[in-house]
Image (spheres, rainbow, N blue to C red):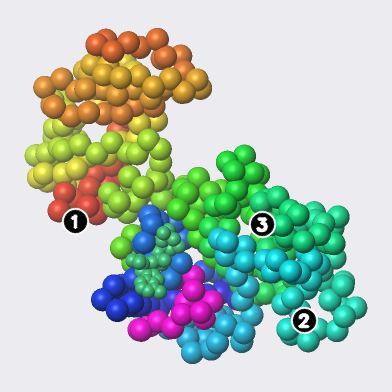
């Protein structure tokens, strides 16, 4: 198996700078997810790891070996694309066997490996069919089987589940994770779905504008986001961010104050997650008026207008609060440990918990 190091990767397409100096280490046997909005450079990063694209600057290193200038076939990498790219005129067996045949693997060994991959993906009964005779989910399994059949050191997946319906996506994401664990293969998985990223990734690299914003475990990026971009990109509904001022340890925000906030002075941005708001409790309390209630059954999303402060705050509360009505006055609260402080100029996190 192999670790992957990306060092200072810059990639330009004409005037577009797709990657602005990407540094990323993927550990041997780790599942790393690249997460970010459309156009942030996820696919480009993956294609550079695969060798399908050359970086303009920087190095790609597999397990200590510089592979920056090696063609894809010499990298022991397999890739699953968003559009499975199965050969329509070949049966499932031959689709899965294809990478082995071009490597001139002997036919009894081809049969053994195809059976092994098909069993893992539970598609043994489909080997004689053509791709058009398969459902989307089955085609997706065939594409994954074809990728693992060569037992690659590195498995790359670019939004492999995006063509599936919501229920199948949820099922497949945990299956991909289990398969990666079982094979112990180093995986880089691209998605713009944050829940998928959290489920699949041992660690997640959050990207924006051709840069890695933060790398961490799902817990780390949720609890200690490095900046306002990561803070608002992770979590749904997104983190509330309001203006505040800290003066001599006194943090003023939303028409209220909290003492003993050390280490930061001046204007700040204050973040707290909708799901961490409580009604009638908390270290920081602010009166608000219910503006709108979205009843999701298990939870309710409540839009709160904060009196005097002119700010709108979103709270995610237990379904028991579904009886809240627009116009109703509430006292909303947040615990000190759930308050994040960011630099208003750079967006960088200054403090997690006050
Ligand atoms: N072959 C290319 N020629 C020109 N520009 C390109 C090319 N490939 C990518 N780009 C540009 O580089 C940037 C990054 O693209 P990339 O495909 O890596 O984004 P992405 O994060 O995968 O987005 P998505 O989630 O939409 O797939 C975009 O601005 C894109 O338009
Ligand atoms: Mg892409």
Residue at the disc numbered 3: 140
Q: Quadrant of residue 292?
A: top left
Q: Is 84 placed above or below 269 here?
A: below
Location of residue 99 with respect to 80 vertically, above or below: below
Viewer-side label of 1, 3? 3
Q: Which residue is painted at 41% across and 50% down in the image?
A: 221
Q: Label 2, on which residue?
A: 101
Does residue 347 show up magenta in the picture?
A: no
The residue stretch that appears in magenta: 45-58
- Ligand 1 within 8 Å, label 1 CB: no
Mark positioned earlier in the residue sequence (1 or 2): 2
In the shown orientation, is residue 342 left or right of residue 177? left
Is residue 72 visible to us here?
Answer: yes
* Above or below for 311 versus 349: above
Which quadrant of the frame does ligand 2 lie within?
bottom left
Identify the element where label 1 is drawn.
loop
Mark 1 crowd level (few <14, some 14–19, many ≥20, 10 Å Cα)? few
* Near-viewer residue (9 or 81): 81
Q: Return the residue found at the far right.
A: 108
Image spot of residue 87 (x, y percent): 69, 69
């Amino acid at each position: 198996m192999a670790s992957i190091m990306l060092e200072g990767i810059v990639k330009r397409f004409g005037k577009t700078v797709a990657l602005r100096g990407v540094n990323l280490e993927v550990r041997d046997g780790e599942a790393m997810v690249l997460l970010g909005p459309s156009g942030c450079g996820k696919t480009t990063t993956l294609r550079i790891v695969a060798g399908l694209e050359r970086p303009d600057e920087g190095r790609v290193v597999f397990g200590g070996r510089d592979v920056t200038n090696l063609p894809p076939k010499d990298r022991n990498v397999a890739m699953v694309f968003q559009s499975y790219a199965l050969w329509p005129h070949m049966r499932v067996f031959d689709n899965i066997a294809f990478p082995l045949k071009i490597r001139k693997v002997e036919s009894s060994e081809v049969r053994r490996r195809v059976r092994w991959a098909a069993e893992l993906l539970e598609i043994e009964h489909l080997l004689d069919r053509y791709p058009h005779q398969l459902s989307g989910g089955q085609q997706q399994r065939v594409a994954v089987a074809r990728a693992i059949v060569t037992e690659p050191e590195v498995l790359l997946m670019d939004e492999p589940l995006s063509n599936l319906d919501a229920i199948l996506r949820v099922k497949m994401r945990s299956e991909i994770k289990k398969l990666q664990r079982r094979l112990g293969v180093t995986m880089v998985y691209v998605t713009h779905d944050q829940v998928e990223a959290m489920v699949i990734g041992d660690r997640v690299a959050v990207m924006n504008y051709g840069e890695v914003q933060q790398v961490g475990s799902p817990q780390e990026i949720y609890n200690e986001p490095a900046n306002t971009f990561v803070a608002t990109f992770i979590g749904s509904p997104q983190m509330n961010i309001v203006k505040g001022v800290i003066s001599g340890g006194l943090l003023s925000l939303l028409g209220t104050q909290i003492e003993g906030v050390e280490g930061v002075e001046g204007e700040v941005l204050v973040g707290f997650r909708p799901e961490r708001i409580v009604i009638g409790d908390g270290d920081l309390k602010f009166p608000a008026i219910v503006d709108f209630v979205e009843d999701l059954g298990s939870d309710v999303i409540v839009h709160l207008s904060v009196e005097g402060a002119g700010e709108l705050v979103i709270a995610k509360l237990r379904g028991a609060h579904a009886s809240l009505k627009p116009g109703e006055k509430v006292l909303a609260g947040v615990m000190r440990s759930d308050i994040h402080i960011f630099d208003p100029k750079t967006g960088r996190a200054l403090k997690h918990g006050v």
